[in-house]
Image (cartoon, rainbow, N blue to C red):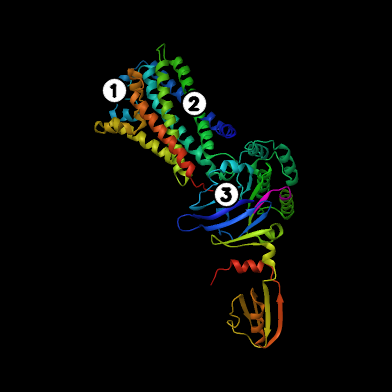
Amino acid sequence: MNVIEINNLTKTYGKARGITDISFHVEEGEIFGFIGPNGAGKSTTIRTLLSLIYPTSGSATIFGKDCIQFAPEIKKEIGYLPSEVFYYDNMKVKDLLKYSASFYKKDCSKRIKELVEIMDLDLNKKIDDLSLGNKKKVGIVQGLLHEPKLIILDEPTSGLDPLMQQKFFELLEEENKKGATILFSSHILSEVQRLCNRVAIIKEGRIVTVEKISTLQENNYKKFKIETAAPLDQKYFQISGVNNVEVNNNVTSFIFKGNINDVMKKIAATEIANLWIEEPDLEEIFMHYYEKEV
Amino acid sequence: MNIFLKELKSHRKSLIFWSIGIFFMVASGMAKFEAFSSSGQSINTMMADLPKSLKVVLGMSDLDLSKASGYYGMLFIYLLLMATIHAAMLGATIIAKEEREKTSEFLFTKPVARKTIITAKLSAAFVNIVIFNLVTLVSSIILMGKYSHGEAVNREISLLMAGMFILQILFMVIGSALAAVKKKAKTAASQATAILLLTYGLSVAVDLNEHLKGLKYLTPFKYFEAKQVMYGGGLKPSVIVLSAVLIGVLSFATFFFYKKRDLNV
């Protein structure tokens, strides 16, 4: 079953920002990464899913129900952690969590206690007096206290120290094992690589690709580095499948995806001094997606 | 219910300050009346020398200031201004503050419909306004009882407070409708206050210039005037109906536009 299904979602704000024709789905029990540079449209997509803003066209369903028409109902089972957390300043942490829990028709006190312990939170402090990282921790507890079936995280790790980040990831993996589906938006690749099964890459408001992390890393991408006697022409390797060509004196490097024979023939046709063929790391693959087409 | 209670709590302090303010407003006003009337000089002959425009601006035209009731009638316009400013700002901020304080990402991702949130918030504002009105009523009755020298004024005070209550509700929904419609909700409170001062200015202008009489329905401050309410007129059914219609339309607008709104986060 698909927990989230997004169909041709478009949101335009005047002329400038927004998202265009976004479609992807998140399956039940999956940790789905949503990755892209700042301003690509990750938050806009998430805010539309949560009906904080309304789409210009297209639609989305959560748990099989339209995310606008059935918003109050589906939000019972959603936990959301925004990228920047803001709460009522004059409230104590304790009061805020109680207030948050009062929206769900179940007893959350036990889970709050557990989460507060894991996150190492001081319940009697005023929200106003908390540091950014501690506010984020309140946000984490607040988002998870009702044991939601779908957890939506928008750049959740900013402000958390590495130790807390680690605890937070463990917490998420635990929730996932218990059956929660997670939509994890981030611009930090290593986080996504560590947690997620599949990713959607978004760039300038459009989905570039939706793939399994493992597929992205699979052998169909090769990184070539060739040392030749004399510098090669930049255009020498202009065949389909070759990307990110860099010529540095006698060394030429590029990423290749396609029929390996084509590129081998090209290499064989020239005088080479040395040759490296490697698996590219994810970072390089993403850079390839991120870079604006020239 | 939880939102309603939270809103009551977060406006408690400001309501207490407003209540203290309104009590002292009535107390200091009536104390001045006491000083006037005990000086043995007739206020009316003194006031007769004042130019009409000044009397209009000060809200004392056509009132018998030698009596406590007349003096209270003059004071009423200031109480009314305080009450409506409170109501307009309350109506605007109670709606706009989630976006202003960026807490909308918290509240509006909870499993509640927007109309439920607005209902809770407007109910809390309504309770605040009822309390404000009762505080004014009780302060007035107690303090007038002290200074009125036996003149029966409680009925007049109650009528004036009923009129004030209707205007409070009207300005509350002017504020909330502005907060729901405007893209930048933060500016709703100042705009609601601007509308209030503008319509008050218009009511003064209507008093000063006979030719503007036709405009009196445009300003709520002409709906329930002390001189007319106290001297036998009571509350006119026509303006009660007009207020009710305006309140209905503006409440509907608050819900309608807020439901369709893209929240600023």
User: Which chain hosts label 2?
Assistant: B
Point 74% across, 52% down: residue: A170
Q: Look at the picture and state if A34 lies above or below A290.
A: above
Q: Nearer the viewer, residue A147 or A58?
A: A58
- Alpha-carbon distance for marks 3 and 1? 74 Å
Give residue B48's mark: 1
Q: Look at the picture and state if A146 lies above or below B29.
A: below
Horizontal and vertical percent for residue A3?
Answer: 63, 50
Q: Does A178 appear in magenta?
A: yes
Q: What stretch is highlighted in magenta?
A: A176-183
- Alpha-carbon distance for marks 3 and 2? 43 Å
Q: Describe the element under mark 3 as helix, strand or loop.
A: strand
Q: Are marks 3 and 2 on the same chain?
A: no
Q: Nearer the viewer, residue A42 or A214?
A: A214
**Which of the two discs, 3 and 1, sits closer to the camera?**
3
Q: Does B232 appear in magenta?
A: no
Marker count (numbered): 3
Looking at numbered disc 1 in the image, what kind of residue is underneath it? Answer: Ala
- Can residue B122 be seen here? The reply is yes
Q: Mark 3 points at which residue?
A: A61
> Sequence-wise, which precedes: disc 1 or disc 2?
1
User: Which chain hosts label 3?
Assistant: A
Crowding near the residue tagged with mark 2, few <14, some 14–19, many ≥20 C-alpha atoms within 10 Å: some
Horizontal and vertical percent for residue A147?
Answer: 69, 43
